Every structure is written in C-alpha cells, then in structure tokens.
Amino acid sequence: MADVHVADKAQQFTIDKIRNIGIIAHIDAGKTTATEAILYATGLRHKIGVVHEGDTTTDWMDQERERGVTIVSAAVTSFWKDHRINIIDTPGHVDFTAEVERSLRVLDGAVVVLDSKMGVEAQTETVWRQADKYKVPRIFAFNKINQIGGDFYKTLESVKSRLTEHAYPVMLPIGKEKEINGWVDLVTMKAYRYNEYTDKTLIEEEIPEDMKNEAMVYRTHMIEKAIEADEKLMEKYLSGEELTVDEIKTAIRKSTTSLEIEFYPVFGGDYRGVAVEHLLDAVVDYLPSPLDTMPAQGTDTKTGETYICKPDKNEKFVALAFKVMTDPYVGRLVYIRVYSGTLKSGSYIYNTTKGKKERIGRIVLMHANDREEIQQVYAGEIAAVVGLKDTSTGDTITEEGMHVVLENISFAEPVISMAIEPKTKSDQEKMGLALKKLMDEDPTFKVSTDEESGQTIISGVGEFQLEIKVDLLKRDMGVDVNVGAPKVAYRETIQGSADAEGKYIKQSGGRGQYGHVWLRVKPLERGEGFKFVNSIVGGTIPREYIPAVEKGVKAAMEKGVEWGYPVVDVEVELYDGSYHEVDSSEIAFQLAAREAFQDAVRKAKMILLEPIMKVEVVTPEEFVGDVIGDLSSKRGMIEGTEQRGNVQVVKASAPLAELFGYVTILRGLTQGRAAPSIEPSHYEVVPANVAEKLKTKD
C-alpha cells in the first residue's frame, strides 16, 4: 500500500486548490524519477524510488520494473502548500502514446521534462503535438542540468528551434554541470544556493555579479511577454513603474493558462533533490486549476445544442471515462474525470455514449496500483470507479435523465499485426477472455480473425507494444501462446476515377433476389478515409436500400480487392441503378454494391500503401556511418544528422516492413551503445516491384 493514507485529506480541498497535471517526456528523460521526488518532497514516500532498481511507485508493473520504462500511465495524489496535486506519470515510449493521449484529454496542465544532456528528442515532439491538440498549458522542467553534458542553455535553444519560440526561463542555474549549486529566481531577483542538490536547506543571497546583466535580460524578455495577458499590468509596466513579485506571478500565471497567448515557463535542476520543491511551487503558482481552463463542452443528443459543463459540484453530474484497467483486488476499474456535479458511491449513472444505465459500486482514489475508498467525487477531480461493466474509454457518463455526450478520444490506428494461437485447449478457452480484457484496457490494441486462415490476429502501433501484450498474456493471465512473425498493415487505394455496374439477380422457384447499382469512385487526399455520396434522384433506387449499398461498399473495402488489405481514401458515389418491386432486398443491393465497387476500383488503377516510420537513432559518432548505411539498405531516406551533447542523432524515415527486429540489429552494429526511437509517420506508395511480391491474395 501507499506510505500514507490520502483519501480523507484529498477531499478537503476546494476546486481552486486542485491541480490535475501530467508528467510528459521522451523515454529516459527522468519523468518517473521526478514523480518519485515529488512524492518524497510532499511526504507520500519515505525515500525516492529508483527506476533501475525497480522500486518506483508509478512503475508498478513487472514489465515496467524489468525494462526500466513506463508502460501504463499511473495516477497519484500529493499535497503541497495547501493544494492537492493529482499527477499522472505517462509513458515515454512511442508504442504507448495512447496513454499520453487519453491523459492529456482530461488534464488541466502538464510538466514537460527534458533530459538536458539530449535536449528535445523524438517523443518530446510527439507529446508536444498531443498537448497542442488539447490546448494543455505547460511548463518545462530541464532535468539533469548538474550532470556531465547537461546544458540548460543548449536545451533552451533546442526547445525554441524544435517546439516553440515562446519558452521563457523563470530561473537560471548558477554554475555549470557538476558545479551547479543553486539558481537565480527571475521573479524575486534573488539567488538561492545549496551545498548538495539533495540538501533541502536553501541560502538566499544576492545574484552573483557576473550573472546580473544576463539575469536582467532574461527577466525583461519574460516580463514583457507575460504582461500581454493583463492590460492593467501592461500599462503599469510601460509607464515605467516596477511590478511587484505578486504582480509578476499573476502575469506569468495568466499567460501560461491563456488560450490566446503562448507562454511556457522554463525551470531547471536535478529533479531528485531540492529543485523539485521549486518545481512544485511552479505547479501551484502557474498551472491552472479546473476553474482556469475552458469548461468542457458536450452535445445534447436530443436537442443538438451545445452543453457547457460548469466546474461546480452543485451542477448536474457529467464525467468522461478515460482509462480502463483490471485490478487484481477489485476487478474492472474505470478512471473518470468529473467535469461537473458530484458522483456518490452506490448511485446510478447513465452512459450517454452507449445509452445504458449502470450502477456505481465503489469509488476509489488511486495511488499508482494502490487504492483508497472514498464516498464521493466532485467536479474537477479524478478518481476510479468499480462496477461499470459496459463503460469504455472515451464514454460519457452522466446522472440519469441527461443526454449529454462529450467529445470522444481519438487514437492512432494499428500499423503492425501478428498471428497468435493458444498452445493447448485450456489456453484456447482462456485466450479469448484475456485478449478482450487487453483490448478493453488499450484502445490501440486490436484483435481480429483472419477469415481465410481462421487465425487470431493481434494488432498495435509497434513491435514493443505487441511484445508486452504477449508477455502479459503469458505471465499475468496464465495463457501460453505461440506467435507468428509481425506483419505490416498495408492499405489499398486508387489513383484515378472510374465507373462500374453491379447487378445481383437470383431466381430460385419462390421469391427471387434483385439489386442493381452504378457506382463512381475517385481518390481522396491521403488520410481522408472514406466518403459515400448518394446522388440518386427520381427514386431509381428506393431510399430504404441506400444504406445497404453503403454497407456493401464498406464490406468490400474492409476485405480488400487487389492485395487483400483494406481500401482507404476513396469517395464512392451511387448515381444510378434499378430495383424490382417484389424481388429487391437489402442483401441483394449489398452484393450488387460489392461487385460494382470491386470492378470500379480495379479500373481506377489500384496502388498499395505502406506505413512509413519516423526514425531517430542516438549514437556515438564512430557508428554514424554504419547506422546510415544500414538504414539506407532498408529503403530508408536519411533526412540529416545533428550533434546532441556528445552523441550524434541520425534522422530518417523508413518503411515499417523493413524495420522488424531493428533494435536487435542496431545493438549489434553499435555494441549496444545506440538507442532508436521509431514512431508511425504516414503512408506512402509501395514501389511496384515490392507490391508485386505481396500479391498473395485475390
């Protein structure tokens, strides 16, 4: 269990004293260690857990502790200076960005942790884009600045060139690398020194003489940007009056939480020690409470009107389910963010997404994999509930009688799959339930059945993700399985436009079957998916058969035409056809549409698309040539290299089909000293000679 009980204390805070924040970063930047230091500083742990020793709070899974990486986001609650801080430590590995996506959807603010020896890395850019998507206010925490190679100013340059120009230091480190022993606070214009980074004793003194000019320049830039959010403070500053410390903090807070002004405060330190207390102050001072963010908006499905969820515990209850997990002690847990109202244990709720009524069994406050029961949860809070059998990630739950649906959460589509089969008959019985549970917990993990082979296929966004799922099946769920080689999620599409007729006629003594359609297909822009256009006029096909035509087209698209992979980015227009008063049926029009679609796309010059991955390899300089040569041999396009600290970063894009087992290959090439980052980028046309080899299905 957690070192202290927090449930009673957690419910004592008013909504303005709550901070819901995420810790986001690239893998190995120090997110989990920073979270451990926060728990230690706030009294929730008696010591700081160490990732490589496997005793951290938020990395609680066996798979996380063995590999030293965060796989699932973990929620913890801490307290600092009369504030409640709900923290979600998110994964940094690209295969688990869904965990970051759903966390950012419900959080009010984020701390972006960067390894100051490396600057901005590949996954930092990904999580930054995700935070932009949800308009999440952020502060930067440059970690490890007091280690060899750590550089606060180079990291700042990296942020400004790769993420945002609007990053403004609120402090400057005193010293360099291992000599760092304090910082200059640009708000108070005082220096704060310590003997060791683990020593909580701070000595306040005047700013060192050789830093005064530099500090004044950074402070001026910071203030001049921050006051843009407050007209009164801007007038006061421009008239030559000195702003007070409280006024500067107010300006920074307003700018950081503003949707109109981009302002990201920058802090730095070794977040295993005293610097974490400075960071906690920043979370309280500058990141928003639920009252400072735009209220969540939903749609009333009965009236079509927009519904504003006021962050008030006395309003009607509305919440979003953003995560599902199975707890070995209490069963299925659904994490919720409450946007308005109050939810009480034992009450009934209405799942407006699915149209189902459910009962809340228990409400628990999570502390990683520990839990404490509470009786109710209020607007602005995050908790987990027990008892919801039909509620999934992205569903809206409300009090009975409401019809409000919040915006769902979108996730990346799988790009890789593999066949999986049980080793024994007893494993077969368990495998279906286990896979269903894994799908329930991870929206990017899909399970399907190959119609031709009858094989069970698991799909995901990366090799590592599937490796973890198989490990969970075997170790945690007791299902022994065999797995096949990974396969690429290719897609078919068209280059041109074409028309085709589909006719299904069948006579068999009694009532016959009759369906007749004319379809026109044309290509859409990459990523647009599918568009169905009904251009029937004059009733040549009755209205009740139009959905059947669309259903038939979708079935043909899903099965594939030329290579057996789903067809994407196509507009299909139904513009003519005919029907029979007695013999026409939905199934006949489905089959006619399927035939017409297949003929039309074959005429429209079909091409095969493959997923292209963004690749970054961090490597010692002596191996750069080998890394580039190997990537080039994998149909990779080298986009450039850059110096980052004392290593080189090779940037490239390469087809996923060529990257299976790449981590092992790279380890052999570089004596285990290089680290790759691979994430989905986009789809591109497969070269004709490669596409020809893949024609294994008709």
Image (spheres, helix red, strand yellow):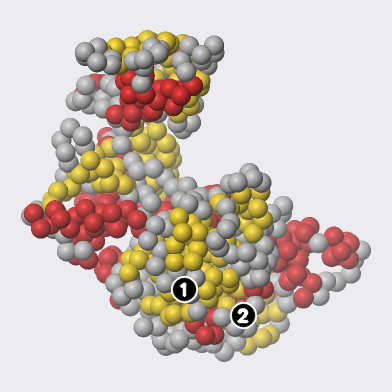
Category of crowding for the residue at label 2, using alpha-carbon neighbours closer than 10 angstroms: few (below 14), some (14–19), many (at least 20) = few
Pointer 2 or 1: first along the chain? 2
- Residue 346: give its label: 1
- Residue 13: give its label: 2
The answer to which image quadrant residue 551 occupies is top left
Which one is in front, 105 or 93?
Answer: 105
Residue 466 in the image: state x and y as whole percent.
27, 52
Quarter in which the C terminus is drawn: top left
Quarter in which the N terminus is drawn: bottom left
Q: Secondary structure at mark 2?
A: loop
Q: Secondary structure at mark 1?
A: loop
Question: Is 92 drawn above or below residue 538 in the view shown?
Answer: below
> Which residue is at the far front?
510
Residue 627 in the image: state x and y as whole percent.
30, 44
Which one is in front, 448 or 444?
Answer: 448
Question: Is 406 drawn above or below residue 207 in the view shown?
Answer: above
Residue type highlighted by circle 2? Phe
CA gap, disc 2 to disc 1? 23 Å
